[in-house]
Each structure stands twice: as C-alpha cells, then as structure tokens.
Amino acid sequence: MNYEQMNNNKLQLIGTVIKEPVYTHEVFGEGFYETVIAVPRLSEQKDFIPITISDRLLVRHEVKVGDKISVTGQFRSYNKLEGEKSKLLLTAFVRELLPIEDGQSPNIIEITGFICKPPIYRTTPFKREICDVLIAVNRAYNKSDYIPCIMWGRNARFVQNMKVGEKLTVIGRIQSRNYLKNLGGEKTEERVAYEVSVSKISLCEKDDSDVVEIASAEVE
C-alpha cells in the first residue's frame, strides 16, 4: 500500500472491549479476529463499533472484555451475500494498538474519496437538515471501501447538489445506531448501522490517476 492510500483513510478510537475477540478469517497466513468496543460520546451515550484485529497484534497486546484500548487504523467495508443481495458491512481495521494519553479524542476519522451515489437530502420534522452521502475510498490492490456519511445543517446544504465523482475530504466520528429492518409483512429485525457523522468537509482537485467506482452493495 502506498502512502496516499494509507493517508486517505485514517481513524483513531478509544473504547472499552465488550466482546471477546472471535477468529474470523486468514489472509496470507495472518489470522484476524473481530470484537466490539464501546466508544463514549460527549453525551452519556456510546457508539458500539466493530473492530478487526490481527493475531500479530494480539500476540503483543492481550485484548479482553473490560479492557480500555486505543487503536488506529482504517474504516473498511466488505460485501456479504444474503440470498441474492450483497450487503455492505463495515469495520474498523486496526493497524496499531497504542498507549492511552490524556486529552485524546476517543473517536476521530478522516477520509478522502469520491461521491459514488447521488446525495440524499432531507429535513426532519423539527426542520433539521440532513444529507446522506456514500463515499468510495481507494485502497491497495484496486479495492475501494464504501463509507456511508451523514452531514448536518450547513454541511448538508453544501453537499446536497454535488455530483457522483466529486472528490472530497471529510472529518468526523464513527457512530452506530439501532434501527428496525422490515423483512416483509409484520416481520421486523433489529439491526445496527454504522456511518461517519461529519463535522468538516473540504473539496479536493482530481488528477488523471483518480478513479471512482459506483457501489453496488445494499447500504442500510
């Protein structure tokens, strides 16, 4: 992975482990585990964010339920087939486990990528402006991560008329939210969605090497 591809997707999270790490898969002989950390907001609420961590890191740093940990890495997506549909799943891919320092933000992410679906602008019953944007972030080996973002107020107005292919950098935090998925008829299922709540947006100039792909996965 080149420097630009490492630099266009950066996160840092500080939270408490709430699930024992579970082995999920292996890539080129390196095993990977998944767990969930509870990350505090400024309010009393918490975001429950899935993380993926390699056995290489776990050998040096034991991670167990109740531990408070600080991680850096990238917010990544992958597709999971459910019947005939492809569902977009998201995880914080851990690159480093770091000591916790005073004054650190518990939840910050910065990504640079391309709008890959038309923005969806709306207002709430309380007249709050919201805009949903799906951003494709390039990764090594010709892969892309598709990151759902939510803009508020002035940022929502700023981005609402942007076109597919526009390149931008956003800074914010990863948030989780529970919702009920209608499965047909009277059947519902509680699920969790993850997205970047954006606090800052800046436009970027594209060059000849920039490529944008249109996401085909279902985003919920």
Image: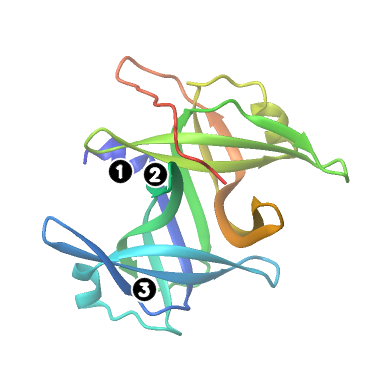
Q: What amino acid type should be assigned to the residue bearing mark 3? A: Pro
Residue 38 image offset from top left, x and y in percent: 53, 72
Residue identified by numbered label 1 = 6
Q: What amino acid type should be assigned to the residue bearing mark 2? A: Asn
Residue identified by numbered label 3 = 99
Color encoding of the figure: rainbow
Q: Which mark is residue 9?
A: 2
Instruction: Please tell me in which quadrant of the rendered image residue 24 appears.
Output: bottom left
Residue 191 image offset from top left, x and y in percent: 58, 60
Residue 101 image offset from top left, x and y in percent: 44, 72
Mark before the other along the chain sequence, 3 or 2: 2
Q: What SS does tag 1 mark?
A: helix
Furthest-left residue in this view: 29
Note whether residue 174 is visible: no
In the image, 101 versus 191, the foreground residue is 191
Furthest-front residue in this view: 185
